Image (tube, grey):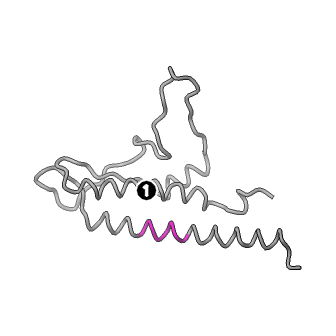
Amino acid sequence: MKLDDVFGIHEESLRLRARRSEVLAANLANADTPGYKARDFDFKAMLRKEIQDPVRLASTHRGHIRPDAGLIASTRMAYRVPQQDSLDGNTVEVEREQSEFSANAMHYQASLRFLDSRIKGLIRAIKGSG
């Protein structure tokens, strides 16, 4: 039995949701920064890609060019297009970011609950009922 089969996509989902929380939190933190451009990524597309092609680059020598840090490279994120332009060039819309952050947190919790129930089930199976 492979744990990947037991946990399904939820392990990768948690990693992506955690990264998305960081991105959305950065957007909210910079809501008043002139010229700041809000960023985000398509969660479903990234999850699909991570499951199909989970290759991670690593530098093995200090002279190597380091891959973009983090689970989602900044080059794979998109800039948000605001509903209404601001005078200072900032594209953060606080209400939208808060809504996205809350929805992301709920999905994160759902994956945690799923994994928790799977782990408890495995523990019961290992210990047996007797």
Q: Quadrant of residue 105?
A: bottom left
Q: Which residue is drawn at 57% across and 67% down?
A: 111
Q: Which of 48 and 17 is in front in this view?
A: 17
| Up/down of 72 relative to 22, above or below | above
Q: Is mark 1 on a helix, strand or loop?
A: helix
Q: Please, what is the dominant secondary structure of the magenta stretch?
A: helix
Q: In x, y percent, where is residue 38?
A: 29, 52
Q: In x, y percent, where is residue 87?
A: 10, 53
> Which residue is denoted by mark 1 in the rendering?
20
Q: In x, y percent, where is residue 76?
A: 43, 44
Residue type at mark 1 is Arg
Q: In x, y percent, where is residue 72?
A: 47, 46
Q: Which of 109 and 77 is in front in this view?
A: 109
Q: Quadrant of residue 124?
A: bottom right
Q: Residue at x 23, y 57 (%)?
A: 31
* Region rendered in magenta: 103-110
Q: Quadrant of the N terminus?
A: bottom right
Q: In which quarter of the image is the C terminus?
A: bottom right
**Residue farthest to the bottom?**
130
